[in-house]
Image (tube, rainbow, N blue to C red):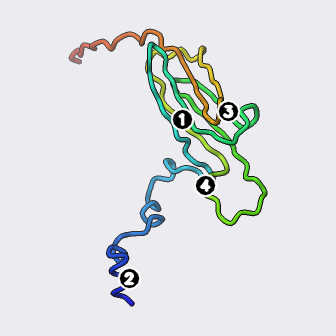
Amino acid sequence: MASDLLRRFPFGYWWPSLPDLLEDFPVDLRMPVGEHMLRIEESETDGVYQLKAELPGVDPDKDITISVGDGVLTVQAERAEEKKEKQRSEFRYGSFTRSVRLPAGVREEEVTAVYDQGVLTVRAPIGEAGKPARKVEITRGG
């Protein structure tokens, strides 16, 4: 019996289980229970930053919230589980959230969003980036 287990799971005796492995992960970096990470695509074309997020089965009028500020774009969504009898489901329900740092120069006040066929597309024009960094001279105290 033990040899069968060892053949099927050769690392099972010394490799930690996933929950044990994640137990020491910093608490402030973990996703809250019940929240899932949104899958996204980011691109930048012709001076426009674009983020696409997969959000099938949600109502954009009541289930999606988008906020932008201090150079960070945050998308939050909620997908309620249908109350149907299922033998098996791999769908994700609950809260979804994703925050991304925007490129320098994004004009936050001009961000737009469109939801079409389960995909949320957020666009933001990119203006001129801030002033370039300058060298700071060091003086000696004395």
- Under tag 2, what secondary structure? helix
* 78 or 137: nearer the viewer: 78
Residue 118 location (% of width, % of height): 64, 36
* 58 or 95: nearer the viewer: 58
- Under tag 4, what secondary structure? loop
Residue at x 50%, y 53% (from the top left corner): 27
Amino acid under disc 3: Thr
Amino acid under disc 2: Leu
Amino acid under disc 1: Ser
Tell me the crowding category of disc 1: few under 14, some 14 to 19, or many 20 or more residues within 10 angstroms, Cα based.
some
Q: Mark 2 to mark 4: distance in Å?
A: 32 Å
Amino acid under disc 4: Val
58 is higher (above) or lower (below) than 88: above
Please identify, in this view, whether the residue under mark 3 or under mark 4 is nearer the observer.
3
Tell me the crowding category of disc 2: few under 14, some 14 to 19, or many 20 or more residues within 10 angstroms, Cα based.
few
Query: Looking at the rendered structure, which numbered label has been put on residue 99?
Result: 1
Which residue is labeled 4 in the image? 33
Residue 83 location (% of width, % of height): 78, 57
The quarter of the picture where residue 46 lies is: top left
Which residue is labeled 3 in the image? 65
Q: Mark 2 to mark 1: distance in Å?
A: 42 Å
Tell me the crowding category of disc 3: few under 14, some 14 to 19, or many 20 or more residues within 10 angstroms, Cα based.
few
Query: Looking at the rendered structure, which numbered label has been put on residue 52?
Result: none
**Which residue occupies the extreme bottom position in the image?**
1
**Seen in the image, is 40 located left or right of residue 62?**
left
Residue at x 44%, y 18% (from the top left corner): 45
Q: Mark 1 to mark 4: distance in Å?
A: 17 Å
Which residue is labeled 2 in the image? 5
Lower sequence index among marks 2 and 4: 2
Q: Mark 1 to mark 3: distance in Å?
A: 12 Å
The quarter in which the N terminus is drawn is: bottom left
Lower sequence index among marks 1 and 3: 3
